[in-house]
Amino acid sequence: MAESVSVYDLVQNARLSVYCGEEFLKTRRISTSDISRPGLELTGFFNYYPAKRVQLLGITEISYAKRMEPEKLLEVMQEMCRPETPAFVISTQLDPPEELLQAARQANIPVLGTKLTTSRVLSNMTNYLEDELAERKSLHGVLVDVYGLGLLITGDSGIGKSETALELVKRGHRLIADDRVEVYQQDEQTLMGTAPAILQHLLEIRGIGIIDVMTLFGTGAVRSRTKVALIVNLANYSKDDKYDRLGNGTENVQIFDVQVPKITIPVRTGRNLAIIIEAAAMNFRAQSMGYDATATFDRNLNNLIKQNSESDTSEEQKNENIIKQNEAAIAPEKKSNTAGKTKEEKE
């Protein structure tokens, strides 16, 4: 987890312009992803002023500032320009108040601008800062993008994770990270994965060494980051272990606050793991879209059992009808045989 990012990085990633303080962009640091909208502060209320946040002024704040007395506005702006304040951002291509520029120059604080609306630039800056400042965890595995799904391939060292990733890259999929994967929580339902800076685009193959995937296969063979949608665990095959054969044995692994589905694929000689992982990705996407092959199989099986049960019932009913017909045919014959007999003969 990065403890802070520079205002310069924010300017580059959020595409902001600079009104003043360009020489301080790399020295000013941002340590929180929260953005402040200083509305109450313009009225002089500073009992709680989050000075460590980027201060965003939109149409409402600028309109209010224009109606203030210049002396009062300068006093408020000087109070807002604390040593820990990283930067001011003016949205909607508005002109910053001269009092703000004066106070910011005195405190060596950059004043930035954008043509985007307040809501839009707020979202862009928050997303960037949350990604950069989020807590990170390093996992052992290989992260690949297969049909747009981020698959985290895990397993014991030497089981073939990197070789499988190489085969997937040759088949047109993309590598994100090999050996070490840095994951962080983007929101309540999203886990993102990326490669450490030192390992970007690199893949280690035993017997060959380290190869640069982007150099050998082109820029289309790599990605910088992706959402971790599924964990594929490679396990050495053992006849004593039980493996899921119907597709209803998916388990979940909790990483931070996110539940990530996990499947286990047994590894043995002759199995093409790349094709199996491709099929797993397509099947997972189909399930996400509402189609479940296991449910279809169960439904077909239940229908077959029902048909067989109805057939058996029909056969039993047919046999019962034949027995009743035979009994009905025998009954008149017995009655005619006993009709002419005397009481004593009947007895």
Image (cartoon, helix red, strand yellow):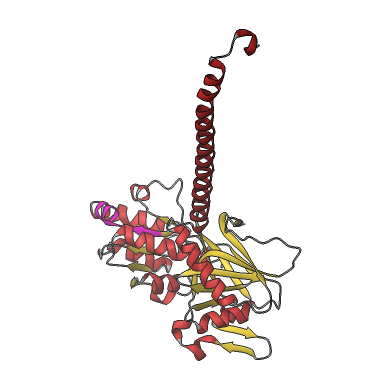
Q: Which residue is drawn at 37% across and 50% down?
A: 41
Q: Which residue is drawn at 68% across and 78% down?
A: 269
Quarter in which the C terminus is drawn? top right
Q: Nearer the viewer, residue 240 or 200?
A: 240
Q: Nearer the viewer, residue 267 or 233?
A: 267
Residue 39 coordinates in the image, percent (x, y): 34, 50
Residues rendered magenta in the picture: 55-64
Residue 36 coordinates in the image, percent (x, y): 41, 55
How many numbered tags mark residues here?
0
Q: Which picture quadrant has residue 121?
A: bottom left
Q: Which residue is drawn at 50% across and 38% down?
A: 318
Q: Vertically, is 216 above or below 233? A: below
Q: Residue at x 60, y 63 (%)?
A: 263
Q: Vertically, is 189 above or below 321? A: below
Q: Which of 181 and 82 is in front in this view?
A: 181
**Residue 294 in sight in this render:** yes
Q: Is residue 265 left or right of residue 302?
A: right
Residue lying at the far top of the rendered structure: 343
Quarter in which the N terminus is drawn? bottom right
Residue 175 coordinates in the image, percent (x, y): 52, 78
**Residue 196 in sight in this render:** no
Residue 270 coordinates in the image, percent (x, y): 65, 79
Whether residue 309 is in magenta: the answer is: no
Q: Vertically, is 40 above or below 168? A: above
Q: In this view, does 9 lie to the left or right of 244?
A: left
Q: Taken as a whole, is the magenta stretch helix, strand or loop?
A: helix
Q: Which picture quadrant has residue 92?
A: bottom left
Q: Which of 23 and 170 is in front in this view?
A: 170
